[in-house]
Image (cartoon, rainbow, N blue to C red):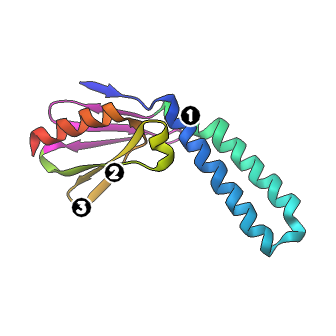
Amino acid sequence: MKTYLPPKSTLIVWQIRVTVLLALLVAVLYWFIADYFLVLFCVSLVLAVVFNLIYFPAFLRCYSISVNQNAIIIKSGVFIKHERILPFPRMIYAEKQQTLVAKAFSVSALVLRVARAATLTVELKDNDIAEIMKAVAKWQ
């Protein structure tokens, strides 16, 4: 069984996404509630700190993808632990997804489609994604 862990660059990608999203949210809401801009700015700053410095690092430490001969096992969760077992015989396809920010850091997400469900993984190194997709392709 081989286990894949998210690289440090995945954390940077998510920190960039959250910071840009909160900055856009503050800019849009500024037009509607300019009187409360300082409060809005402080709340978004606290949210950015909580997510970027506390939650995302903890989530990525708890995240792993294991591939054995029969299935892919995804473990995740900070407060509530989840374990998803995706057996190869029930798997329909695997798809690589990569945003511009992720591409800059050479990481990609993986969509694993099984009967009636799909699972989106966090970003992993491109060569790890290729290995997982090869394992899925052996069963197709």
- Picture coordinates of residue 118 (x, y %)? 30, 55
14, above or below 23, in the image: above
- Kind of element beneath mark 2: strand
- Kind of element beneath mark 3: loop
Q: Quadrant of the N terminus?
A: top left
Q: CA distance from mark 3 to mark 1?
A: 30 Å
Q: Which mark is residue 119?
A: 2
Say which residue appears at 48% left-offset and 36% top-offset: 105
Q: Nearer the viewer, residue 51 or 12?
A: 12
Q: Which mark is residue 116?
A: 3
- Kind of element beneath mark 1: helix
Q: CA distance from mark 2 to mark 3?
A: 11 Å
Q: Is residue 121 left or right of residue 13?
A: left
Query: What span is colored magenta in the figure?
Result: 63-88
Mark 1 = which residue?
Answer: 58
Among all residues in the image, which is located at the extreme top?
A: 1
| Mark nearer the N terminus (3 vs 1) | 1
63, above or below 16, in the image: above
Amino acid marked by disc 2: Thr
- Picture coordinates of residue 11 (x, y %)? 55, 36
Amino acid marked by disc 3: Arg
Say which residue appears at 54% left-offset and 41% top-offset: 13
